[in-house]
Structures are given as C-alpha cells and as structure tokens.
Image: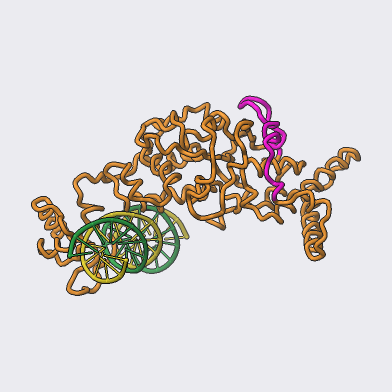
Chain colours: A orange, B green, C yellow
Amino acid sequence: MGRAPCCDKNGLKKGPWTAEEDQILIDYIQKHGHGSWRTLPKNAGLQRCGKSCRLRWANYLRPDIKRGRFSFEEEETIIQLHSVLGNKWSTIAARLPGRTDNEIKNYWNTHIRKRLLKMGIDPVTHTPRLDLLDLGSILRSSLCNSSNQLMNMSGLLGIQSLVNPDLMRLVTTLLSSQQQQQQQQQQREIKPDLLLQTLQQTQLLKHQNQNQNQNQNQNQFSSSFQPNQLQCPIQDISACTTSSTSSPPPYAQFLNGTQQLQCNVEQSNPTNLISSQNSQPNLWQDNVVIPSNFMENSVHLSQNHGCHDQFFVNSLPDQNSNFQSNDYFNQDFGFGSVLSTPSSSQTPLNSSTYMNSSTEDERDSYCSDLLTFEIPDMLDINGFM
DNA sequence: AACCTCGACAACCGCAGCCGC
DNA sequence: CGCGGCTGCGGTTGTCGAGGT
C-alpha cells in the first residue's frame, strides 16, 4: 500500500514502511517514548525522518488504534462533528477513540463525502446542493401550477441564495404561465401537450427575459420576483402546516405528486435556514440561529409513493452535547434533530437499527434516512458528481 | 487472459502555530 | 520582539487490488 519507495533524500528512506522498520519503531517507543521526533529515527537507527516516524506511529502503529471498518455509530459521529467542525479531522478524531485523523479523513473522502454528494448534499456545508438541480427537469415534470408554491419551496429550503435569481425568475414566470394555461385548458376542456408547451414557453420566456434585461425594463414578472422577495414569509410557511398523516400540502404538486412537503415551522424563521454559498463550512451555522424547539418545528419533505425523494434541513447541533452518545436521535442536535419523515418516523430512527449492517447498501439505505436528502431521479445531477 | 477503471488508503507535502532562545 | 526549530494539521498524491469489460 501507499507509495513505492522513492529516491532517498539525504539518505533517508521514504515510502511504505517495512515490517522491520515498524518493529524497530515500536520497540524504541515502547522503551523510550517518542520524545523528540526529530531525534527519534537517529536514536532508533531508522533511516527515516522524524516526521515520517511520527506519522507512522500516529496513524498505524499506535497500540490503541482501532483497525477495521467504521461502525455506524462512528459514521454518525463523523457526520455530526463534520457538520459542526468542518475539516477539523484531528478534533473529530479526538471524539472517536482509536481512530486517527488520517483515517477519518480518508473515510470521509472515500465514503461519506461521496454518499453525501450522491444524495445531493454539499459535503462542505451539509446543505442541499440545489444549485445543481436541473430546474428544467423540474419544470417539465412538475405538475406544479403555482409560482407561489415555488416561492414557498425556495424560501423554505433557503435555496434562493443557491439558485441564480434570473433562473428563478424564469422558473416562476413559466410556472405562472403554466398555471394560466391550465386554467384555460380547464375552461376549454382542451388537453394539449403540456410538455411541448412548456418547452416552447421556456424558449419564449428566455427571449423575453433577455430582451427585458437588455432594455432594462421591468415587466410584471421581474418586478414581482425580485431576489429579495424570494424568501418565504413565515405566514406562507405556516399556511402549509400539516400533520404527517394529513393530505399533501398544495405545493406538494411541485414535487410531481411523488413528494410531500410537510412543514411545521411557524415558530422558526425559514430565512434562518438559508445557507451561504461561502465555502466555509461553518459560516452558515455561525450566522444561523436555530430555535431550540426546532426539533418539533422542523421542516419535512416526506417520502411518499415509494419514492426516495426527500429533502432535509439540518438544524444546528448543540456543541455541548455528548457526541459519543449512542443515541443521537434523542439528542437536540445534528441529525437527531433533523426532521424526520413520515416514512422514517414509522421506522424507528435508532442508530442501532443498522448497527450490525455490514454492507454498503445497507449503510446507503440507512444514510438515505439519516441524511434525508436525495435528489430525485428526475433531477439529473449525475454530471456534477 | 489482458487491459482498464475505480475504490481504498498509506504516506508525503506544505503550511501554520507554538515555543524556546 | 524576532528568529528558527519542531510539531501538528489538512490537502493531496501514488500505489495496490478488486471488479468490470
């Protein structure tokens, strides 16, 4: 494993460690302690630099290192801590006995990060990557006929900061037009090809938008949908409050009938959920105040009709919480406070459920519930992965 | 069977912070 | 206070091996 031995530098060996070297290092440290890493290799008779010795000891030879597969609990903890700490691998490792920062980092990059990306979650910010959504697909497949519903959605999910305002304007414009079209159809009892019309309208509206931009004239659409108006008013969200067993809220249509959005956030300001595009992992958290009762007043996008189309809004973990707990979901932070879905709530969100899972599929499956944000199949984001 | 692709992971590299002089 | 050495951290690289074609 690792790199092949490369040329010596100052007579010092590099590359993978041999069993003999390992034994020398272990013996020396057991007898003398590591002391000064710089002088250790010389004293131990190793043709290695101190840095290499330290790394080998810290990441591989240390007796308290736990080898082997990460348990689901560990995986949970990593995700939780990363959502709070970002890439502070050493700090995360301090919370995971027997695991090294390097090991956690590698595991994150090779497993968790990819899984998050697959689910449409930005592994840096832990927020949905709605900037990657193919809004055209949404339009074409959506039965939504209300632009306000999209506004509710965007405000609720805080995507206005992620979506190009012009594109959002175009979307809402189109949805409004589509609504009018449908009303006209109902009146006339005509059933034209909506898809074709939608596509044609898209092109038409694009031209309109371009012309409007060129002329710097605001028509009814652009003036109606200024970016700063994309945020969802609290009352709008409260209007869509439903129980987990009630009928889908109006904007569920936006999800093509396969998804329901359940929200119960009267007491939580949805604008707080807006994530920053800033790549700093904790910035949005620093700027966001999640009510302590967010657990109860959480935003749900439920799984429905057998689809795995779930949205998730993560609340801010309580940094004072004991991350070593075996029962994250009873705690008031992180994914434990994340909004569950009706389907997931029917299945106990107990970390032990999959504790013995040994396959990636099972982990993926459980993470789908845990992370609760998957990009619908209709949203083609594979090209971004 | 040969080749290719990709996941996994050990190890390296560069930088920043700490600390002693 | 400035400088230099040491340590630790995070990002990245390079190789191996398994699976697919």
**Magenta-drawn stretch contains A227:** no
Q: Quadrant of the N terminus of chain A?
A: bottom left
- Residue drawn where x is 74% and y is 41% of the image: A148
Left or right placement of residue A212 versus residue A134 in this view: right
- Residue drawn where x is 59% and y is 38% of the image: A307
Q: Position of residue A191 (x, y in %)?
A: 84, 43
Q: Position of residue A304 (x, y in %)?
A: 61, 34
Q: In the figure, residue A28 lies in which quadrant? A: bottom left
Q: Which residues are magenta?
A: A228-253
Q: Please identify the residue farthest to the left as the structure is shown.
A: A31
Q: Position of residue A166 (x, y in %)?
A: 71, 56
- Residue drawn where x is 82% and y is 56% of the image: A218
- The answer to whether residue A178 is above or below residue A239 is below
- Toward the viewer: A150 or A254? A150
- The answer to whether residue A146 is above or below residue C12 is above
Left or right placement of residue A317 versus residue A225 in this view: left
Q: Position of residue A207 (x, y in %)?
A: 80, 61
Query: Does the image show residue A151?
Result: yes
Left or right placement of residue A117 versus residue A17 in this view: right
Query: Does the image show residue A366?
Result: no
Count of numbered tags:
0
Q: In the figure, residue A203 lies in which quadrant? A: bottom right
- Residue drawn where x is 34% and y is 36% of the image: A324
Left or right placement of residue A360 versus residue A53 in this view: right
- Toward the viewer: A6 or A172? A172
- Toward the viewer: A92 or A26? A92
